[in-house]
């Protein structure tokens, strides 16, 4: 009849429509779109199914599928700090891969790297499918995961981890690159400003520095500071004004510590890099905000998060890959210079 409005919207496409368009069975469509096709469906066939789903605008009913599989499609990412740029980038990469697989990511800060982390849910084991933890001691995660939730550790000792798998950056090679750069500039009297944190990743830095200096005739002193600019400044001022020959270069565990060294040098009347060379670690935005800009080890944080989440999803699918450490590289900027021919004395106040 004239004047009546009919609902002419096309029916929502089904998996049967996708199967028909791709020329495959519904079981194949389920495997491909459920991301369980590897080793069971040819790559070309899987791509044909994905293309058909895109063209038809097909979206699987995730709620029904999750209920059927007993999964929440949710992963927990545990990090030491939400304010640290490195962990923000890790989250960006992890969330990107999670979204590609229909997962959500809950971000949870646990500032104490070794103390037990509180369960952020009434029961994490009922609310989550798995846990991805960055720069944490796996023992600290017992309250969250119990013995049931799959765990993938980032930046963690693979030999001592309780996780199903570990994903690491090549931290040792990064410290080697920074050390060899300073040695190549003629520096033989170094100060290592180390993070005052009992964490595997910082133990690796210290061991790699020692290895890189072996047989070079160089000496290194160590000072420790918390990961704040002010604490680093205080520690560096004390170390640089101590009796005896002053170090000509400071190698830092983190860009934040390096920024504190630059402030200490300025307060002591020293010029970076003419009197004192400085290197950092991480390549945070801070590295290009200071003057001169920091030479530092760049860590691919987003790629790190991506690989971590991909590994967790693989573990959930019954695989436990142990990927090789992700490569890192030294970014050379203006904070180091050749060793000065003679030291200017530190002004005494």
Image (tube, rainbow, N blue to C red):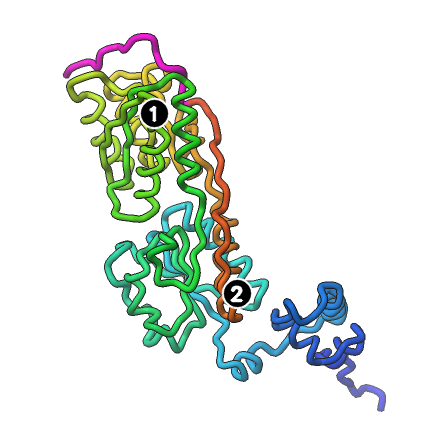
Front tag of 2 and 1: 1
- Disc 2, SS: helix
Q: Position of residue 138 (x, y in %)?
A: 32, 60
Residue 246 is situated, as x and y percent measured from the top left of the image, at 24, 18
Tell whether position 344 is magenta: yes
Measuring 50% from the left and 60% from the top, which residue is drawn there? 321
Q: Which residues are magenta?
A: 335-349
Whichever of labels 2 and 1 marks the residue nearer the N terminus, that label is 1
Residue at x-position 52% and y-position 67%: 319
Give the number of marks: 2
What residue is pinned by disc 2?
314
Residue 191 appears left or right of 348:
right
Q: Quadrant of the N terminus?
A: bottom right
The quadrant where residue 217 appears: top left
Q: Mark 2: give few (<14), some (14-19) or many (20+) Cα within 10 Å.
A: some
Q: Residue at x 28, y 66 (%)?
A: 118
Give whichever of 28, 233 is nearer the camera: 28
User: Quadrant of the rendered structure where residue 59 is?
Assistant: bottom right
Magenta span has 128?
A: no
From the viewer's perspective, tell me whether residue 45 is left or right of residue 172: right
Q: Which residue is mark 1?
A: 215
Q: Give the class, few, some or many, for how many residues have Cα within 10 Å of label 1's Cα (few <14, many ≥20).
A: few
**Between residues 241 and 214, which one lies in front from this camera angle?**
214
């Amino acid at each position: 009849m004239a004047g009546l409005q009919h609902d002419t919207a096309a029916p929502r496409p089904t998996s049967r429509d996708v199967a028909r368009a791709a020329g495959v069975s519904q079981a194949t469509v389920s495997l491909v779109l459920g991301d369980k096709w590897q080793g069971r469906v040819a790559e070309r066939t899987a791509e044909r199914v994905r293309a058909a789903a895109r063209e038809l605008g097909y979206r699987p009913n995730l709620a029904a599928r999750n209920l059927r599989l007993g999964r929440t499609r949710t992963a927990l990412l545990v990090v030491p700090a939400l304010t640290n740029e490195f962990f923000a980038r890790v989250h960006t990469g992890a969330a990107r891969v999670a979204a590609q697989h229909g997962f959500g990511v809950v971000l949870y800060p646990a500032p104490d790297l070794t103390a037990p982390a509180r369960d952020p849910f009434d029961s994490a084991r009922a609310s989550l499918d798995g846990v991805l933890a960055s720069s944490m001691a796996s023992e600290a995660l017992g309250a969250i995961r119990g013995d049931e939730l799959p765990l993938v550790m980032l930046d963690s000792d693979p030999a001592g981890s309780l996780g199903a798998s570990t994903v690491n950056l090549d931290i040792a090679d990064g410290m080697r690159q920074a050390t060899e750069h300073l040695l190549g500039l003629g520096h033989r009297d170094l100060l290592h400003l180390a993070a005052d944190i009992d964490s595997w990743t910082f133990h690796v830095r210290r061991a790699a520095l020692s290895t890189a200096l072996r047989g070079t005739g160089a000496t290194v002193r160590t000072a420790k500071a918390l990961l704040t600019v002010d604490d680093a400044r205080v520690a560096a001022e004390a170390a640089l004004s101590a009796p005896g020959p002053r170090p000509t270069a400071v190698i830092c565990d983190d860009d934040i510590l390096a920024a504190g060294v630059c402030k200490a040098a300025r307060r002591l009347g020293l010029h970076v890099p003419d009197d004192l060379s400085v290197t950092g670690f991480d390549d945070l935005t801070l590295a290009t905000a200071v003057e001169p800009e920091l030479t530092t080890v760049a860590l691919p944080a987003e790629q790190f998060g991506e690989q971590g989440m991909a590994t967790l999803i693989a573990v959930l699918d019954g695989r436990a890959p142990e990927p090789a450490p992700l490569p890192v590289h030294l970014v050379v900027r203006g904070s180091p210079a050749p060793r000065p021919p003679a030291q200017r004395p530190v002004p005494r106040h």
